[in-house]
Amino acid sequence: MEKIKRFEVEKLKKIQIFTGAQLKYIAFLSMLIDHVNNAIVTPLLDGGGFLLYLSNIFSILGRIAFPIFVFFIVEGFFKTKDRRKYLLTLMLFGVISEVPFDMFTSKTFFNLYWNNMMFTLALCLVTIWIIDIIKRKITNKALWYITSIIIVILFCLVAMGLSLDYDYHAILAAYIFYIFYDKPLIGAGLGYLSIIKELYSILGFAMTIGYNGKRGRQYKYLNYLFYPVHILILGILRFYFNI
């Protein structure tokens, strides 16, 4: 059995070609494509033609981002030196992003019924953090699993109640990535099943398997500012061109 495990790890190493930076910037590009599609291309659709084909392609490419962002919330949970600071940063940029998000999604300045992805990722972090704390307190593994599932259900309901972007799908995916942190194939496979209605999200889940564990060259402020800045620009364009 141990030989099989070692063989599987070696096989995975051959496809683990992405650093954390490369995956994140692929996710940023995917998110940008998806948001441009939603904010500008989709409102201009009128039947078939080139724009419809373009929109479909953009929609497929846009499905890559979500699994990668949730994957790195779990990775960040295990690797960050200060989880409190990590959570507070996510919450801060959630607040900063909310008006741009509402401008981009609803062409309004405030919409309680759909809230941005930074809050979703923050809730994912809180969920796995609580589950991890309980893991250290409950020695019975079966009891811990049952407790963790109850917590996940509760936080799924919270995500839905707060109308967070990707709502309970994000909580489920984060939980699965956490549980199967050292089993990337299983984590990606079950994570995909948790949001299989988004068929092309398989592209993003597949890419998480290619993560080689290296951070790569990252730009911290770009990582956090990209989200609110690009949706603010798209929101302004929607208002300016009335689309």
Image (cartoon, grey):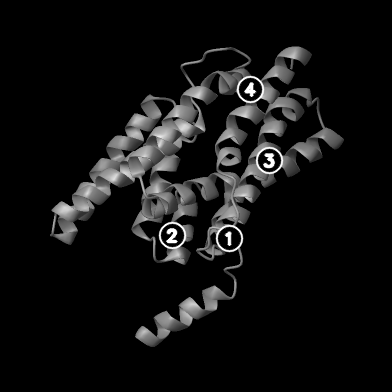
Question: Label 3 is placed on what type of residue?
Answer: Ser
Q: Which residue is mark 1?
A: 19
Is residue 20 visible to us here?
yes
Give whichever of discs 4 and 2 has the lower sequence position.
Answer: 4
The circle drawn on residue 59 is 3
Question: Label 4 is placed on what type of residue?
Answer: Phe
Tell me whether circle 1 and circle 2 mark residues in contact (CB < 8 Å): no
The mark lying in front, picked from 4 and 1, is 1
Front-most of 48 and 188?
Answer: 188
The mark lying in front, picked from 4 and 3, is 4
The circle drawn on residue 187 is 2
Where residue 198 appears, as percent x and y from the top left, is 56, 44
Tell me whether circle 2 and circle 3 mark residues in contact (CB < 8 Å): no
Crowdedness near tag 4: few (<14), some (14–19) or many (≥20) residues, C-alpha within 10 Å: many
Tell me whether circle 1 and circle 3 mark residues in contact (CB < 8 Å): no
| Left or right of 47 on screen, residue 170 | left
